[in-house]
Image (tube, helix red, strand yellow):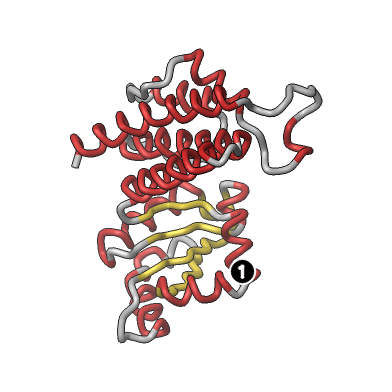
Amino acid sequence: MVTLSQAKQVSDFLVNSLQPLAVILYGSVSTKGIGEDLDLLVVVDDSEVSPLAVEKAVRRKLRPFYAEFAIDPIVLPVGMIQEHWRKGSPFLRLIQREGRSLYMKDSVRQWLNQATEDLATARYLLEGGFCRAACYHAQQALEKAIKAVLIQAGWELEKVHNIERLVAIARNYSVVVEVSDEDAVFMDSVYRGRYPAEEGLLPTGDPTESDAARAIEITSRSLASSKRTQGAMD
């Protein structure tokens, strides 16, 4: 049997020896924490070397682990993943839904870049009078900004969307995020899902222009703080 801890050891070995763009765990070890074998998707740069040749090289690198457990690596260049994702690959959709990221190159910067884009989208939507959507994107930007500094502090990425929980996790990691308890409650309350069924049972009404402006201001302050933290640790 193979555990999640052993999966992380294999990922660290691949990162140090091959410098991939990403290592993604899927299968039973990802969903249950233990399984009979280790299923890995290894994402590499596009190159003139065929994906099959790269996969053979990865398998050779992994031979020291084969006496302990079975490993089934799939190695794909990033261009091929992007192409098949656009075509709606069921395999990649499954990994998106159930997989666990063990490593992503330059992940902190990528999270901050996406947070910046979400915040810009929120401002654009507010200017157009779309307050609900502006609040949604402001909350998404804040979530990504906090996750960026947590990942930098060594936190293992979880599928967490609640701002109050992320702020609490940040305290456990001694990470300062410029979000007060009151602001965290506000961001979680003003957030609206993409579908009516996600809004809960209470008829709380749509966010106002004032709500959207406050959400954007909270996120702007926190994102600026996250970028300063990332810059100081580079």
Looking at the image, is 92 positioned above or below residue 211?
Answer: below
**Is 18 placed left or right of 182 in the picture?**
left
Q: Residue at label 1?
A: 91
Residue at 73% across / 42% down in the picture?
A: 195
Residue 17 location, x and y as percent? 26, 64
Snapshot quadrant of residue 21: bottom left
**Is 103 placed left or right of 93 in the picture?**
left
Residue at 43% across / 73% down in the picture?
A: 75
Disc 1 packing (10 Å; few <14; some 14–19; many ≥20): few
Residue 105 location, x and y as percent? 32, 56
**Dividing the image into 4 quarters, which one contains the N terminus?**
bottom right
Looking at the image, is 152 positioned above or below residue 18?
Answer: above
Between 89 and 37, the one nearer to me in the picture? 89
Residue at 55% across / 58% down in the picture?
A: 26
**Dividing the image into 4 quarters, which one contains the C terminus?**
top left
Residue type at tag 1: Phe
How many numbered tags mark residues here? Answer: 1
SS of the residue under disc 1: helix
One can see residue 159 in this view = no
Residue 201 location, x and y as percent? 81, 26
One can see residue 154 in this view = yes
Looking at the image, is 153 positioned above or below residue 116?
Answer: above
Q: Residue furthest front?
A: 128
